[in-house]
Amino acid sequence: MEKGVEDVNLGTTDKPKLVKLSKSFSPEVKAKYVRLLSEFSDVFAWDYSMYLKVYDKYIIQHSIPIKLDQKPFLQKLRRINPKLLPSIEKEVNRLFKACIIVPIRFSDWISNLVPIWKKTREIRLCIDF
């Protein structure tokens, strides 16, 4: 946990909704923040599945335009530390279940996956284009 910050659960023990509040807040100010955040907790995305719950991927979809005369580029695959594989697999599955990423069967373009550690010691997956 970060210094000077504490986790406060706005949800239940079964479905936690964690927010970080400063430890320097007085009890009154902390209670006001907790009340305010609890009142509007429905506007926050608490997990990946909430990010895209109202958007249809056929209406809003990111694509990378490629010039017709451009040659496909295949990067040399980088090695990934085997100790990171379970964390990477968990994150990829979470992104897949939330329909943030989709499998592509055949592609002439290959870019490396770059795992980055977050401050929370979770993995953030980036792509090195």
Image (tube, helix red, strand yellow):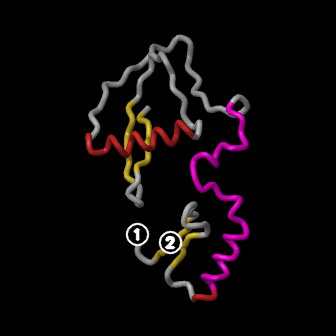
Q: Which quarter of the rendering shows the C terminus? A: top left
The amino acid at mark 2 is Asp
* Image quadrant occupied by the N terminus: bottom left
| Residue drawn at (44%, 36%) of the image | 127
What kind of residue is marked 1? Met
User: In front: 120, or 85?
Assistant: 85
Whether residue 3 is situated above or below residue 88 in the rendered picture: below
| Quarter where residue 115 is shown | top left
Nearest the eye: 117 or 45 = 45
Magenta-tinted stretch: 29-57
Q: Are marks 2 and 1 in contact (CB under 8 Å)?
A: yes
Task: Please give left or right for residue 81 compared with residue 129 in the image.
Answer: left
Dominant SS in magenta? helix
Residue drawn at (63%, 85%), measured in percent from left and top? 29
Residue located 68% across and 64% down the image: 41
For disc 2, the marked residue is 7
- Distance from disc 2 to disc 1, alpha carbons, whole Å, reads 8 Å
Q: Residue furthest top?
A: 69
Instruction: Determine whether, in the image, residue 72 is placed left or right of residue 21.
Output: left
- Residue 99 within the segment the image draws in magenta: no
Q: Secondary structure at mark 1?
A: loop
